[in-house]
Image (tube, grey):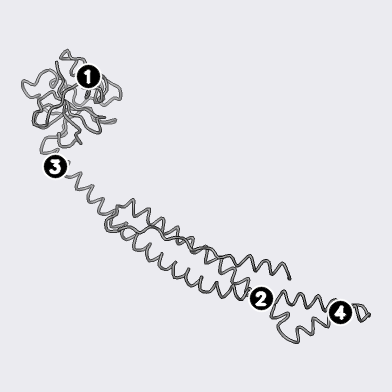
């Protein structure tokens, strides 16, 4: 254990940086997805700190063992005399030949002492590093506990908000007789478009279908207007382009209501209600206008 030991100790003296802290956020204002990502960052930081602490602890043990072994083998006069005696006894009877093992012993002793000294210097560096890592790990654990409490509170707030929104929508739908498979007779004098739309209520949604047994949203509009002799393009976006804008206050039965980024179209039937083929797995139904995220209102010309 001479030059190799010294090289090993030198290589072990590389200092690794402590992981960077996760970006701070306002836990009181952040939503659950932001807090969840923040918690994940903190947990990852803590794992990195733990790995570094374990690496330094293992290095500390190796260096302490090296120093102890050096002290045992070379640290006392008795140990040095024993080594010198063994080296001389192993040499030949020629007096000059006895100096060579003593010189080798002295070289090894110098290298071992140098390695031991550098190991001690490294231990002086490791000790405060381990203290800082321990403190950092404890701080991260506290941050994680705080963030997880905030995450739970944010999730509860979001669940409450979703419930309130759903309740408000349901109440609006009830007030307007929003969803009904039996809407009753069509309002008088609304024309064949509205009458046809009412007649389709309860039929299943069918992607790409224009009736007579199933419809998608724009397919229902095409079928309804074809009864009045008006030909409309197949998609809701094209129907938007081929109709004229009106305000909500100008809405009349038979006007078109566009929503969901122009990806959905409904037929206004009066009374703040629309008939539409709502979505896959559902049916043609009557819904409150207030229930839709409206993008605009349009009127089909003759």
Residue extending farthest to the bottom is 77
Q: Nearer the viewer, residue 98 or 177?
A: 98
Image quadrant occupied by the C terminus:
top left
First in sequence: mark 4 vs mark 2 = 4
User: Mark 2: which secondary structure?
Assistant: helix
Q: Real-space Cα distance between discs 2 and 3?
A: 80 Å
Q: Which residue is mark 4?
A: 99
Of labels 1 and 4, the one closer to you: 4
- Residue 2 is marked as none
Of labels 4 and 2, the one closer to you: 4
- Residue 116 is marked as 2
Please name the residue shown 23% across and 27% down the image. 277
User: Mark 4: which secondary structure?
Assistant: helix
User: Mark 1: which secondary structure?
Assistant: helix
Q: Nearer the viewer, residue 110 or 52?
A: 110
Q: Which residue is mark 3?
A: 171
Q: Quadrant of residue 126?
A: bottom right
Badge 1: residue crowd in 10 Å (few <14, some 14–19, many ≥20):
many
- Residue 222 is marked as 1
Q: Real-space Cα distance between discs 4 and 2?
A: 26 Å
Residue extending farthest to the left is 188
The reply to whether discs 2 and 3 touch (Cβ–Cβ < 8 Å) is no
């Amino acid at each position: 254990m001479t030059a190799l030991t010294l090289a090993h100790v030198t290589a072990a003296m590389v200092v690794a940086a402590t992981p960077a802290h996760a970006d701070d956020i306002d836990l009181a204002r952040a939503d659950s997805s932001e807090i969840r990502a923040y918690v994940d960052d903190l947990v990852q930081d803590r794992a990195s700190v733990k790995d570094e602490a374990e690496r330094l602890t293992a290095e500390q043990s190796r260096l302490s063992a090296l120093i102890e072994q050096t002290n045992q083998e070379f640290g006392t006069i008795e140990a040095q005399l024993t080594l010198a005696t063994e080296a001389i006894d192993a040499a030949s009877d020629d007096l000059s030949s006895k100096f060579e093992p003593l010189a080798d012993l002295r070289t090894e002793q110098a290298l071992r002492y140098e390695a031991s000294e550098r190991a001690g210097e490294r231990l002086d560096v490791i000790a405060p590093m381990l203290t800082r890592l321990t403190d950092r790990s404890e701080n991260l654990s506290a941050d994680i506990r705080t963030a997880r409490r905030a995450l739970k509170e944010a999730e509860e707030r979001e669940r409450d908000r979703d419930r309130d929104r759903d309740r408000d929508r349901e109440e609006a739908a009830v007030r307007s007789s929003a969803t009904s498979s039996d809407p009753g007779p069509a309002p008088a004098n609304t024309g064949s478009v509205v009458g046809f739309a009412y007649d389709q209520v309860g039929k299943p949604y069918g992607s790409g279908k224009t009736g007579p047994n199933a419809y998608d949203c724009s397919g229902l509009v095409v079928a309804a207007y074809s009864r009045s002799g008006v030909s409309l393009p197949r998609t809701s976006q094209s129907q938007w382009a081929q109709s004229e804008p009106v305000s909500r206050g100008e809405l009349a039965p038979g006007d078109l209501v566009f929503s969901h980024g122009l990806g959905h179209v409904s037929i206004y039937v009066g009374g703040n209600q629309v008939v539409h083929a709502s979505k896959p797995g559902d049916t043609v139904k009557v819904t409150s206008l207030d229930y839709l995220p409206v993008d605009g209102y349009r009127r089909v010309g003759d």
